[in-house]
Structures are given as structure tokens and as C-alpha cells.
Image (spheres, rainbow, N blue to C red):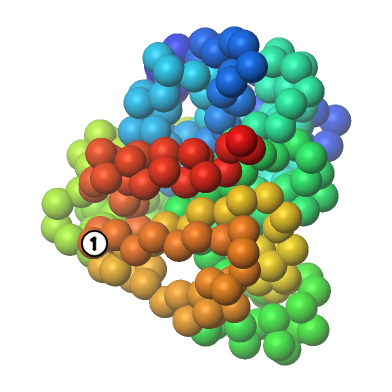
Amino acid sequence: MPAPLPGRRVELADRRAGRLMLYGEAKASSGATATPPLLLVHSVNAAATAYEMKPLFEHYRSQRAVYALDLPGFGLSDRSNRKYTPRLMTDAIHAAVHDIQAAHGDGAIDIVALSLGCEFAARAATEAPNAFRSIALISPTGFDRRSARAATHSGGNGTRAMPWLHGLLSVPLWKRGFFSALTSRASIRFFLQKTWGAKQIDEGLLEYDYITTHQPGAENAPYYFVSGYLFSTDAMKLYQNLSMPVWMSHGVRGDFVDYAQKVQIKRLPNWSVSVLQTGAMPHFEKPVEFIAQFETFLKGATPE
């Protein structure tokens, strides 16, 4: 399978997260005003890979050290048949941060995450706050009414796992066949159009999504995603506990527009929120506007 992003690849072997693929451009600024490395974390869905962060990776690769991670179960990382949990995904981010810091010094980095990847990034940043200078969240999960209900019913701990559904999906007789039907080009286009909230999508992302979903083991992590194992019921608590500058951006079209719980963080002094006239992938739809707002946020996050 071709790599989702151009440039250098770094294969990590983490004892907790397994084999991970980190794509990196190690160009680094120097001097007193050196820009810290940037780590990009994709979302989780049936076809997720680091390709979802391609516009940002390509923009920054000639300007600063930028890295993108294939989370466990996706892209060129380990897709073995194991249990996929928020802990596994968070450990993968910790492993990537450790490797980046080993290459660039122990300074704090910037991180940008997408959708469900935001929950894993937030957990990593609450567990190791000194490792992160700032955190940017694109269309983050955990802000909708369903998440609020799940947090209330669970006491704010655990996940939304449905073991019965995972067991049903994993029956060997149809495990692979059902996933193949779910990831036909027509199905992928349908789901991307729901994400964009428009007929026009990124055709390169569609083609790569098709390629990555037709590899051995491609169904393993997505079945845990569909069964709720990767959704944490304490996501809002994680977001509220972030101590570094946080920027949240989201669109207004498509299936991902319920941010009812946004009111809980809007008044926090370290948070800023931008609403773009896009779907859930603003960095694809309006990259110039998105990057300009991200850069404004980063300037405010830089100590004088």
C-alpha cells in the first residue's frame, strides 16, 4: 500500500501501542524563537489514515518540523486483531511525542487532531501537559448531546462499548465480507459527502480511503470504533482539564454539527473557538482560511 503522505517515514516499535508509522519532515527552526515541532493526528472511522491531515502536512513540511501519525489499526501501522481502546490510541500519541522530542529536544510540541482523534490527543495532553505547548481540535467529538447523555449514565468513566455489536460484526462467516460492502467506492463517497455536507468532496481522499480499506486486517479497528469502544464517556472532563492554549474549530454543514456542550468550554480562559462555513473537514475545504486562523491562534499561544 502506498504511504498516505510524502516524505520520510519513521517506524516506531512501542511496547504498548505496537508497530506505528510516523511520517515526518524534520526541518527545524533555530534560535531563541525556534518553532516547536507539529504533530498531526487523524480521526477514526472505517477508512481513517494520516491522509486526512494531508493539507496541513503539505503546507508545513517546508516551514517547520511536522509529523503525522497513523494510529493503531490504520494506515501503515499495526492492524492486528486485538482490542482497540482509547488507552491504546493515547499510548500511540505518547510514543510519537517521545520520538519527536528525542529528535528535537525535550521541548513542548504543538498538536492538531481531528474528530475522535481529539479525544485521544486531549487525554495525552492531560497526562503529560508539559509535552504540549498548544492543542488544536478540528471538529472534535464529545460535544454533542449523545455524549452528554453517555457521560451522565456512565458516571463519566469508561467508554460507550457495545460488546454484543462487536461480537456480531466479528463472526468469521461475514466479518470481512460485510466490511468490504461497507467500504465500496459508492459507500465511501456517501459517507464523505455526509462529512462534507456537500456533493463535492476531496477525490484523492476517496481513492486513498478505498485503498486502505482493502488491506489485510483493515476491519479490525473500525469494528471496535463502530461498536463504541473508542468513544470515552469522560471526553468533556478531559477537554475542561486541558491547561495549555486550546483552539477548537468546526463547520456548520453535514452530519457533524452538534456542539451543544460547547458552552462548557467557551468561557475557559485558555480556549478559543472558530466556526467556519464548511463541513467537518475545514482544512480540506478552506485551507487558506483555516491555516490563517490556526496561525493567529499559535501567535497567541507563544509566550512573549
Position of 67 relative to 29 (above/below): below
Residue 240 % position (x, y): 69, 67
Name, please, the residue furthest toward the right: 15
Residue at the spot 76% in from the left edge and 83% down from the top edge: 154
The reply, left or right, for residue 51 in relation to residue 163 is left
> How packed is label 1: few (under 14 Cα within 10 Å), some, or many (20 or more)?
few
**Can you identify the residue that label 1 sits on?**
277
Element marked by disc 1: loop
Residue at the spot 53% in from the left edge and 36% down from the top edge: 40
Quarter of the figure with residue 167: bottom right
Quarter of the figure with residue 164: bottom right
Name, please, the residue furthest toward the front: 304
Residue 127 % position (x, y): 82, 50
Position of 289 relative to 193 (above/below): above
Q: Amino acid at mark 1?
A: Gln
Residue 261 % position (x, y): 54, 79
Position of 49 relative to 195 (above/below): above
Residue at the spot 54% in from the left edge and 19% down from the top edge: 65
Residue at the spot 14% in from the left edge and 52% down from the top edge: 200
The one of 162 and 50 positioned closer to us in this rendering: 50
Let me know if residue 277 appears in the view.
yes
The reply, left or right, for residue 277 in relation to residue 227 is left
The one of 109 and 52 positioned closer to us in this rendering: 109
